[in-house]
Image: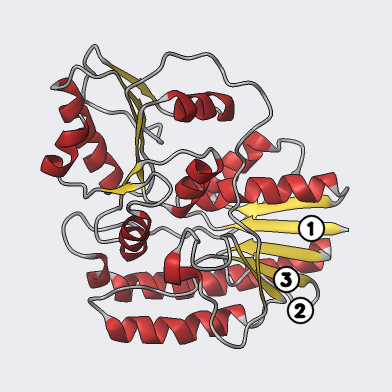
Amino acid sequence: MKVLIAPLNWGIGHAARCIPIIQHQLKEGKDVHIASDGEALDLLKAYFPKLTFHELPQLAITYTKRLPLYFKFPIIALKVMWHYRKDKRAIAILQEQEQFDIIISDNRYGVRSKKAKSYIVTHQLKVVNKRLIPMEWLSKHIIRRLIKPFNTCLIPDYEGIDNLTGIISQPPLGITYLYTKPLSRFPIDSLPIPLPNYQILAILSGPEPQRSQLENIILDLASQSSKSVMLLRGTKQAHPITASINVKILDFAGDSMLQSLVCNSQTIIARAGYSTIMDLNALKKGAVLIPTPHQPEQEYLAQWLDGKRGFEYCSQRKKDLEKFF
């Protein structure tokens, strides 16, 4: 059987959680193709260099520096709608060329075909925004309409009240769904790399400019602290700030190194992105979760998990982060 797996390129989280899906399909002997764009495509090419890859249209979304995200919502909605249409056209052409039996799309709602069994992977079944209740109501109907054409919605979370996503992953009426439990490439079988134990491990991710703003705050606080700090930047972009003697910096870490760092560090600071949360949960590690400012889903997840499974909520304000350094 020929399978297409297509994650959304919104950071690398969607691609990362597709890794165990790809590995499962390969173990079953299926002919796996991967379709995406940008960093998500690059990540999966590095993991599975022998597979067949296809490039899909790009979706370029940036967050605001100071204004809440909902001020940009009309622009973002138009971009997402246009991207959905471009994905539909691209996948129709690709399906004619490759004749896939199964299509597994992670948050790319335009990637489906009536000529293949089509599955959508998403935990984002409800938009939570206390400031814009009408948007919550409207989004519920839009999400249901987008999911309904798929054969099944695969929800990467535990079923029930002891889940990781609270009300976000509650499926709307009228769709076929299956809870898969959280998806993570961890723990990996290889023995952890012996590394120094760090008192603080800061894992950065997500879109600009907020990623750089948090990086600058952490480096500033670390320079005034005596604690040993490892900073995983999550980008190859150059940074102008020189680290102090107690701070080590890496742009990225391989799986073995990342697993060792997470397991051996005393305090972990990370964004409240769901893929990061699933990876930490798989390694049975909590963290200080800092939601990307004005990103309602991350704000909700960090608050929902505050005090659960070793997680703690913290805002991006410097004065709130000081206590951890």
Q: Report which residue position mark 3 lands on.
A: 118
Question: How busy is the neighbourhood of tag 1: few (under 14 within 10 Å), some, or many (20 plus)?
Answer: many
- When the figure is inspected, residue 165 is found, relative to residue 280, above or below; the finding is below
How many marks overall?
3
Question: Which residue shows up at 36% across the image and 69% down it?
Answer: 76
Nearest the camera: 148 or 169?
Answer: 169
Q: Report which residue position mark 2 lands on.
A: 114
Q: Amino acid at mark 2?
A: Lys
Q: Report which residue position mark 1 lands on.
A: 3
Q: CA distance from mark 3 to mark 1?
A: 10 Å
- When the figure is inspected, residue 234 is found, relative to residue 195, above or below; the finding is below
Q: Residue 300 occupies which quadrant of the picture? A: bottom left
- Relative to 188, is 75 on the left or the right? left
Closer to the chain start, of discs 1 and 2, is: 1
- Relative to 52, is 86 on the left or the right? left
Helix, strand or loop status at disc 1: strand
Question: From where the camera sits, is residue 73 visible?
Answer: yes
Q: Amino acid at mark 1?
A: Val
Closer to the chain start, of discs 3 and 1, is: 1
The reply to whether discs 1 and 2 touch (Cβ–Cβ < 8 Å) is: no
> Residue 142 appears at what percent x and percent y?
48, 83
Q: Residue 212 occupies which quadrant of the picture? A: top left
Question: Which residue shows up at 54% across the image and 58% down it?
Answer: 8
Helix, strand or loop status at disc 3: strand
